[in-house]
Amino acid sequence: MRDCRELLDQFRQHGYRITPQRRAILRVLADSACHLTAEQIHERVSQSAPDVSLATVYNTLRELVAVGQLYELDLGLGVRCYEFASQEHGHLVCSKCGKVEDVLGNTEELAALFPISDGFCPTTYSLVIHGYCSQCVQSLGDD
Amino acid sequence: MRDCRELLDQFRQHGYRITPQRRAILRVLADSACHLTAEQIHERVSQSAPDVSLATVYNTLRELVAVGQLYELDLGLGVRCYEFASQEHGHLVCSKCGKVEDVLGNTEELAALFPISDGFCPTTYSLVIHGYCSQCVQSLGDD
DNA sequence: CTCACTGCAAACTATTTGCATCGTA
DNA sequence: TACGATGCAAATAGTTTGCAGTGAG
């Protein structure tokens, strides 16, 4: 239940208009801490504003990403997920049950670990660590 | 121009038949060090074996990934890329020109850097570091 | 000789776009 | 009021699948 007034302001300052649809989409994003797909966002938005089309959700997400308020994730599942651009972090994805957890870590640490060649100047990263979560690792032989 | 005999053997040992199509696809993958999309692989395969369909390319790629001979990459560009599963590495992607470079690093180092909670057991990772390559970083103000 | 593999085309999923209408600034 | 934003439906891109015919083992 985070306040999304400053988000709206930032968005407006980039030249975008504040419409009821965009307000509803930002509200949903602000209220959910985790990564959601466009479809999931559309579902949740529809509960409070049934007339928001999926196309508008996609358009708004694209704009929010462009403005830098949203991160677009590719967890390797064929669907894009979106989450608020707050603290930098990677994701642990369980190869068996699909559960996703966050792991904190910033770009500088990563850049220090990896031998980044010549003059490449890193800005952000996208990290997915695949493996098995504590529950699934116990039942690995059970197939 | 790597030898792909052992690749074929491994593939066969998993119960797959060696067909001319699969041979051609493996040849292309073995000959190209970098990440390719399914479409690009199909193009190259078509040069030596014009009758290989795109569907067969997709099917074979999926099988190679399942067997562990191939990595599937998501560089955040909406297309999946494939590359041989050799040394573990991440990718530097230039946000301006799109150039992709490899950075070496293994899962253990990564797992040590990130505070991986409870019993999560990492197997592999997928890392994309976004930023600007040495050429583009110089011309950043030029828009 | 059998059953896995193939090509083709159609189906599907995720996402984008064209256009007439609507409503924010 | 003007022009950016919207909903709808159609278009697109990438990938998967059903099926009848083919060929590897």
Image: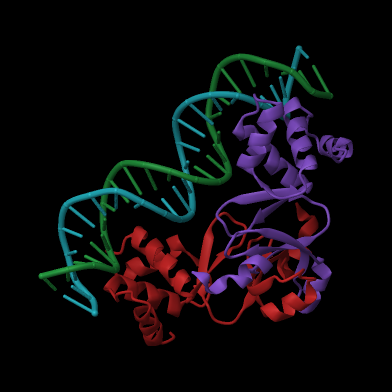
Chain colours: A red, B purple, C cyan, D green
Nearest the viewer among A54 and B33 is: B33
Nearest the viewer among B99 and C11 is: B99
- Residue B69's spot in the image, x, y percent? 79, 46
In the image, residue A100 sits, relative to residue D18, either above or below, namely below
Residue at 53%, 57% (x, y): give it: A79
In the image, residue C1 sits, relative to residue B141, either above or below, namely above
Asked where in the image residue B27 lies, by quadrant, the reply is top right
Asked where in the image residue B99 lies, by quadrant, the reply is bottom right
Residue at 69%, 41% (x, y): give it: B61
- Residue C13's spot in the image, x, y percent? 48, 49
Residue at 58%, 65% (x, y): give it: B95
- Looking at the image, can residue B96 be seen? yes
Residue at 76%, 44% (x, y): give it: B32
Q: How many marks?
A: 0
- Residue B122's spot in the image, x, y percent? 77, 66
- Looking at the image, can residue B116 be seen? no
Work out which quarter of the rendered image holds the N terminus of chain A and state it: bottom left
Asked where in the image residue A124 lies, by quadrant, the reply is bottom right
Q: Is residue A98 left or right of residue D7?
A: right
